[in-house]
Amino acid sequence: MSEVLTAPLVVEFPFTRSLGPVLSAFLTGLRERTVLGVRAGDGRVVVPPTEYDPVTAEELRELVEVGSSGTVTTWAWNPSPRRGQPLATPFAWVLVRLDGADTALLHALDAAGPDAVRTGMRIRVRWAAERTGAITDIACFEPDDGPAGDARPAGHSGEFADPVTTLTAPARLDYTYAPGRAQSRYLQALAGHRTVGERCPSCRKVYVPPRGACPTCGVATGTQVEVGPRGTVTTFCIVNIKAKNLDIDVPYVYAHIALDGADLALHARIGGIPYDQVRMGLRVEPVWTEDGRFPDHYRPTGEPDADYDSYKELI
């Protein structure tokens, strides 16, 4: 039995946005241990505050301060916390309606177990020791044995010293990828400095990288065909933004390359030539690093450029 290939992969995209007056006041308030909401057109107090009325869509600006204690309206137990969640030990996700608010806020409740959580229980904010102006300034909620507080929200200007004006949200997905039969053969061939595709038994097209089935005919592909190693640049883009954890100076070129004998273009980086001299029809070949399992990049072969008609169907 051949080796089953797997690899841990991470997709990450930190997104930065400007906050505007309402969310800026809300997050700056958390830094100052103050919870703010906004009053909607019908008089309801919305927490977390929104910039526009959820019913009428009118712009909202009237900020009010609500309590740091509240009532659980519903909850779900989380027995296995994941990386980046508020607590490392099992906890409850709760919707809590803070005193003075008319909507519920989602956050974590630190509780001994699911039997210690119930709808209607009173809880209070546990503030983070170090606060920066983010929702994580509320470290979590904890049970509160005290009575309900004054339910009347107080008006607030929303003005603080050194307000928070931007927010960076770290979006990240960690997963394990298993390539399957066709791509496992492709990757194992690359480790031997060979490029192997698969031919469709119906339309006879050779797909690289192979997918296990022909995307046009929908039939399984099992016949392996070695292609390349040389190929033709069909189209390309110039990358001007440096990627995190990628040690390549910008600008550089990423291109679609139709390998000789293949009917599907693969993508790879182009090197060995100034970025502004890369062109459609450029003939290229792979460059392997020592012990590399796949080509590091493709470089010009020195051959004349390919005729457009030879690759126009692969653009």
Image (cartoon, grey):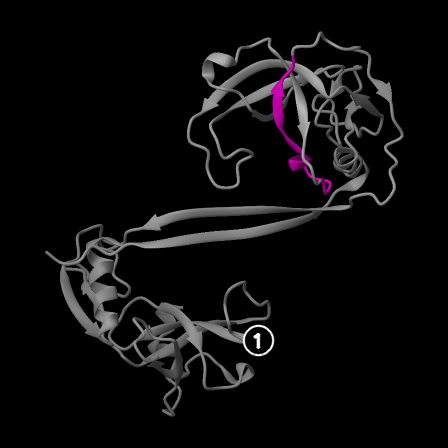
- Determine the image quadrant of residue 108: top right
- According to the image, label 1 marks what residue? 251
Name the residue located 74 percent from the left edge and 36 percent from the top edge: 27
Q: Is residue 187 above or below residue 37?
A: below
Q: Is residue 85 above or below residue 238?
A: above
State the extent of the magenta-drawn residues as a range.
Answer: 131-144
Is residue 136 located in the magenta-colored stretch of the structure?
A: yes
- Determine the image quadrant of residue 37: top right
Outermost residue, left direction? 1
| Position of residue 169 in the picture relative to residue 296 (left or right) | right
| Position of residue 310 in the picture relative to residue 235 (left or right) | left
Name the residue located 41 percent from the left edge and 81 percent from the top edge: 281
Q: Residues within 10 Å of mark 1 (few under 14, many from 20)?
A: few
Q: Position of residue 68 (x, y in %)?
A: 73, 21
- Determine the image quadrant of residue 296: bottom left
Q: Position of residue 237 (x, y in %)?
A: 51, 71
Q: Position of residue 90 (x, y in %)?
A: 46, 27
